[in-house]
Image (spheres, rainbow, N blue to C red):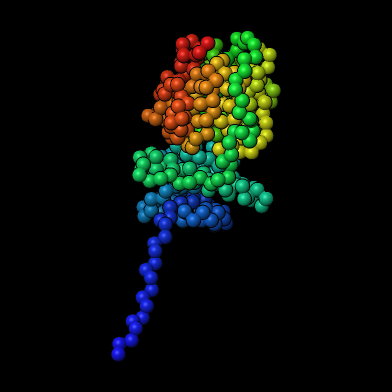
């Protein structure tokens, strides 16, 4: 009698394909700490290199989905390596530095995001920093896929943290006419690719332009240096500085919203002033473009114009729609000139943009003399 055959073990199901992250840092302790943080996300597996020369050897065998790159390293610094990488083997790079000027230069060279180094001695802040690092890597991977036009691949999901609406900071209300004003407001929202885009955009405005307020998604420590760099750009005629609480919007001035606060535009007499307020992250950002745009819709209505420029995600899309509904002029940057056609695409999908324009035509359209304003 033939006995029962032994049960065959079920074939193991293949797990999800993990994405390669290359970490380049000269400190062995930091490399291992970063590796543990990144691999806490099941989507990633990490390879490390102690300097750019080791990284080059790794790149001969591996094409990572994203690179996390330090700046201060022996033999070759991270900035030099980034320049060579972007010329010879461009890929998504997240730069790690706390020096603002280097951060801005990295973004101009081609890094997708820059994160400030954490205070390793303060464990209480490491959880939030670690979540931000993973989110930055996910964004960089998504942008890399978009650049390759891999539209058959769904984007990586973002973490739910910070996915709150503008309602948590400012209740939605219709525009109310509060009397005659000769002032106008221009509001800009921008994220990934904004360092280069804003230099080009602001160079197109003459000195008689209305007061302008800008949310650029950027770590708080880098905002003052970014504003100074725009202000010192010889092609930009307007005065640019980080806005201060209760400051009035004035013609010929550009105010950059500082990091880690939300910005509200309020009607004050015949003009408009700034309120910087605390609150939770909205759409994972603080400041949030949606919060700024909602306040502009309520305070300025038909006396406003707004543009949503290059960036990942959807922050600003709903707020731009509210400005259009309040009678303001609304513009979305087109796909061809956007580094990342995420935020503008979402605005267009929702019917928020009256105009869809290339970057070099947006300044003239936003200026009241462009003939597009409602009043």
Measured from the top left, where is residue 177 in percent x and y? Answer: 62, 15
Q: Residue at x 60, y 22 (%)?
A: 174
Residue 169 in the image: above or below residue 231: below
Image quarter for residue 207?
Answer: top right
Measured from the top left, where is residue 261 in percent x and y? Answer: 64, 33
- Residue 278 left/right relative to 109: right
Q: Residue at x 38, y 46 (%)?
A: 153
- Asked whether residue 91 is in view, the answer is no
Q: Residue at x 50, y 40 (%)?
A: 113
Residue 175 in the image: above or below residue 148: above
In the orientation shown, which residue stands out farthest toward the front? Answer: 1
Measured from the top left, where is residue 85 in percent x and y? Answer: 41, 42
Measured from the top left, where is residue 172 in percent x and y? Answer: 61, 28
- Residue 12 left/right relative to 104: left
| 81 vs 341, nearest the viewer | 341
For the N terminus, which image quadrant?
bottom left
| 23 vs 335, nearest the viewer | 335
Residue 234 in the image: above or below residue 165: above
For the image shown, how many numbered marks are present on the structure? 0
In the orientation shown, which residue stands out farthest toward the bottom? Answer: 1
Image quarter for residue 299?
Answer: top right
């Amino acid at each position: 009698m033939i006995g029962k055959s032994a049960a065959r073990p079920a074939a193991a199901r293949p797990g999800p394909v993990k994405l390669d992250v290359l970490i380049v840092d000269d400190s062995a302790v930091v490399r291992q700490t970063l590796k543990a943080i990144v691999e806490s996300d099941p989507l990633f597996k990490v390879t490390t290199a102690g300097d750019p020369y080791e990284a080059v050897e790794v790149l001969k065998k591996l094409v990572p989905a994203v690179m996390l790159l330090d700046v201060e390293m022996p033999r070759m610094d991270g900035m030099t390596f980034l320049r060579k990488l972007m010329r010879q083997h461009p890929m998504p790079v997240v730069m790690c530095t706390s020096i603002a000027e280097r951060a801005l230069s990295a973004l101009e060279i081609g890094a997708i995001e820059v994160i400030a180094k954490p205070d390793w001695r303060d464990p209480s802040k490491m959880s939030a920093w670690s979540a931000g690092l993973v989110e930055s890597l996910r964004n960089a991977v998504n942008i890399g896929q978009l650049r390759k036009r891999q539209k058959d691949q769904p984007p990586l999901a973002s973490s739910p943290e910070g996915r709150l609406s503008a309602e948590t900071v400012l209740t939605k209300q219709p525009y109310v006419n509060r009397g005659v004003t000769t002032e106008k407001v221009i509001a800009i929202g921008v994220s990934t690719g904004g360092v280069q885009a804003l230099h080009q955009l602001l160079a197109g405005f003459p000195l008689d332009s209305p007061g302008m307020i800008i949310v650029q998604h950027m770590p708080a420590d880098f905002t003052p240096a970014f504003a100074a760099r725009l202000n010192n750009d010889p092609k930009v005629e307007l005065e640019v500085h980080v806005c201060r609480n209760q400051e009035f919007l004035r013609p010929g001035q550009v105010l950059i919203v500082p990091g880690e606060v939300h910005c509200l535009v309020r009607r004050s007499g015949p003009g408009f002033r700034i309120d910087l307020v605390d609150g939770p992250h909205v759409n994972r950002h603080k400041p949030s473009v949606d919060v700024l745009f909602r306040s502009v819709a309520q305070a300025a209505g038909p006396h406003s114009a707004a543009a949503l420029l290059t960036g990942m995600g959807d922050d600003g899309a709903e707020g731009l729609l509210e400005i259009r509904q309040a009678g303001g002029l609304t513009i979305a940057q087109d796909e061809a000139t956007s580094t990342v056609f995420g935020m503008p695409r979402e605005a267009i999908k929702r019917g928020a943009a009256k105009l869809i324009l290339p970057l070099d035509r947006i300044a003239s359209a936003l200026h009241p003399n462009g003939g597009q304003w409602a009043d």
